[in-house]
Image (cartoon, helix red, strand yellow):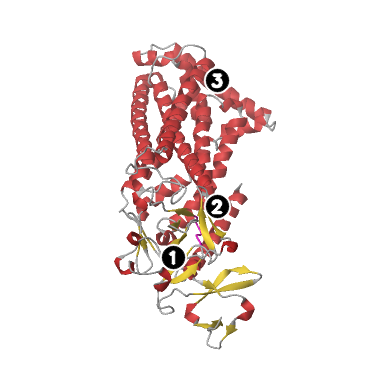
Amino acid sequence: MIKLILFIIILSITKLSLTIENNNNSKICPESLSLPLEPFDELIFLPNGSIIHQDIIYPKKYLRIDNNTNNNRNIIYGCVCEKGFSKNPCIRKCCQDNEILKTTIEKSECIKINETNNIKIPDLLPANNQLSNDLKNTSGLSNNFKIIKNMICPYGMYRLEPERYTDDEFIIFSNGSLKTTEIILSQSEYCIDWNENLNNIIVIVCHIPQSEDQEFDNPIKTIVHPIGVMISIPFFAATLFVYAVIPELRNLYGITLMCYVGCIFGAYSFLVASRLIYYGHFLCVLIAFVIHFSFLASFFWLNVMCFDIWWTFGGFRALQGSIKQRERKKFIIYSSYAWGCAGILTGICLIMDFHPSIPSSFIRPQFGEQSCWFTTDAAKAIYFYGPMGMTVICNIILFISTAIKIVNHKKETAHHLKGIDSHRHDDNKQWFNLYLKLFIVMGINWSMEIISWLCKDAPDYVWYVTDIANTLQGLIIFIIFVWKDKIKRLLLKRFGCKDSRFFQSRNSTRSGYHSSMSTRTNTSTLTPLQDKFKSTNSVEKNIADDQTDAF
């Protein structure tokens, strides 16, 4: 496991270093705004470093050598869109001269025209209201721009739909930039071309990583975040495996923990997949809904865990039936709440995005339009941070209430523990561990996530600690709930690798301790608060034995 983690870290840092180096080399002269000087054998290299390609001289400062190799040699690009090389700014045509753009829900692709029909593709010319004032009288964009023919979008793409959404209405300016109601795009961030009927200009927009320049300057986002998430995923899987194979851990507390960890495991896995692999529009939208549902379900399962602990220590009347029957009834109720609430909220997103009667002025999630996640901050606030914030606030209230009940209960029973100093240390340690687990499980990390999202103007370093902790949730949960002596013993026992003397001594000591505590409790005069706890004695004992010790 340690070797695997070190390998992942080294691989991630190496890949990141190459990415940053390549980003710095291609930032000024991106591939999308340059021409590959090929075939290589026909290039003429001059002594001053310039290159002649098809009778055009490319000075050294307008050349870029790509780090990626093709046929065991580097690719040389001419930076034809750099200021000083061409008198006109560049604009990108998505397809080649004999091709037009075909768009579907899933993808956009270039198709060749039927040459037998002698169809001639006209010069690019958007509608008059899609051009700035100084371009309105042009007969074609080739008169004002140098046309670059490619549809290079490294992080994926989506299509503007001004006929459906007013936010997608655009204007092209004389410097080559394109402006919608929400964003301004440079020439490398979009391309245009005719549709199949040659009567409308289609705009393809490239997905761009948020704050791309800042991400490469911020080591937490570029190095720690991806490494932390990749480290967390195998620890989530390990936690699920341990709780699945050990029968003693599959009580109500263990199963709810498995549901929570399973949801986070799924969300993190699909989140990594959406960042590392390019998907078509349909799959991108599907992944966005899976991530959204998984995160929401994890919030509600965390809420379930907090409520269950609060209920247990609240002294409320237990459900009818045996312990197993009560736990089964509780789990059915908890499952209906957690999965149901997450499903309803994700269903609302589905309706808002795809129901035709929803007005375009409404705030929609817009999954897959710019990335495999929300498009705007307003949508993120309503459909993601809103439900998260409500569950976090509820969890904090439940935590404080539970902590107060535990403190009061300790005061009520303190006189019964006098004279048993040998057990006081263990008792205090158990309570301390329970406090600590409560505090961590209640979602301090998610609270900081919301606060950092709200306080965007604060320096990034303010959130370094919480950001790192958030990405390392898998490791933290594994340490808290799995990396314990009792879990190790149960694993050894489960797979038949046990030391009989070791287990007998440990079990006999534990049995004597709990028997002694049970005798003292039963022969003492119980206070009214203790009477309430007596009604849920089996559940409380389960927490003392399994929840505190095993966890």
Task: Judge depth for marks 3 and 1 and give the one in front.
Answer: 1
Does label 1 or label 2 sit earlier along the sequence?
Answer: 1
**In the rendered image of this protein, does residue 498 appear above or below residue 279?**
above
Residue underneath mark 2: 277
Please state the extent of the stretch shown in magenta in the rendering.
Answer: 151-156
Task: Judge depth for marks 2 and 3 and give the one in front.
Answer: 2
Task: Judge depth for marks 1 and 2 and give the one in front.
Answer: 1
Image quarter of residue 55: bottom right
Q: Could you say where residue 445 lies in the image, as x and y percent from the top left? A: 40, 42
* Furthest residue toward right: 496
Secondary structure state at the residue bearing disc 1: loop
Evaluate if marks 1 and 2 touch, with contact meaning CB atoms under 8 Å apart. Answer: no
Query: In front: 255, or 102?
Result: 102
Query: In front: 121, or 13?
Result: 121
Residue underneath mark 1: 124
Q: Is residue 53 magenta?
A: no
